[in-house]
Amino acid sequence: MAIVGFSFSKFDCFRSNSTYSGKIEISHNVKIDNVLTTKLSVGGGPTNVLKVDFTFSVLYGDNLGKIALSGDVVFSDSEEIITETLKSWAMEKKLPVMINVEISKFIYTKGIIKALEMSDNLNLPAPIPVVPSGMFDSKK
């Protein structure tokens, strides 16, 4: 199993002008939009690989802001696993568990890094905690 390619193709971000106070609920989501095969020519000749289209999104409370990143991941494995993955996607719109875990973790890692940059540009809270809770408590 190997991820051999990755790219973002679309950034859709906004911050509303709504005022807010208190704790903001921040949620993350990785959505697999489509899976198909493509040929990749490396070394010994062309081989079939999976092209997995995705959307990574960060939502801020009730319409306070949103960061949505779209792109694709190119995934290589044995011909049997590629074929089984395509069958699973065609029948259930799901990836096999092991492949889903690997691809989703990769998308989440790349997405959260880019979302951190975008949130800073939009003056939105960081999509991940950047300071451990309790770090600045005076009672410690």
Image: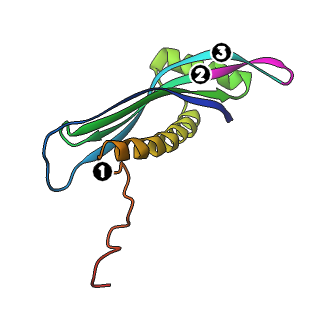
The residue pinned by badge 1 equals: 125
Q: Secondary structure at mark 3?
A: strand
- In the figure, 135 relative to 95: above or below? below
Q: Position of residue 130 (x, y in %)?
A: 39, 59
Which circle, 1 or 3, is nearer the viewer? Answer: 1
Name the kind of residue labelled 3 in the image.
Thr
- Asked which secondary structure carries label 2, the reply is strand
- Count of labels shown? 3
Q: Main secondary structure of the magenta part?
A: strand
Which amino acid type is shown beneath numbered disc 2? Lys
> Which residue is found at the position 29% from the left and 46% from the top?
124
Report the residue at 57% width, 39% height from top: 102
| Range covered by the magenta-colored residues | 43-51
First in residue order: circle 3 vs circle 2: 3
Res. 95 in view: no
In the foreground, 89 or 134: 134
Q: Quadrant of the N terminus?
A: top right
- Tell me how far mark 1 sits from mark 2, CA to CA: 32 Å
- Give the side of residue 47 with respect to residue 49, left or right: right
Q: Which residue is mark 2?
A: 51
Q: Tell me how far mark 1 sits from mark 3, CA to CA.
A: 38 Å
> Which of the 4 image quadrants contains residue 29?
top left
Q: Are marks 1 and 3 in contact (CB under 8 Å)?
A: no
From the image, which quarter does the C terminus lie in? bottom left
User: Is there CB contact under 8 Å for labels 3 and 2?
Assistant: yes
Q: Earlier in the sequence, mark 1 or mark 3?
A: 3
Q: Which mark is residue 38?
A: 3
Q: Quadrant of residue 10?
A: top left
Q: Is residue 100 visible?
A: yes
10 Å neighbourhood of mark 1: few (<14), some, or many (≥20)? some
Mark 1 secondary-structure assignment: loop
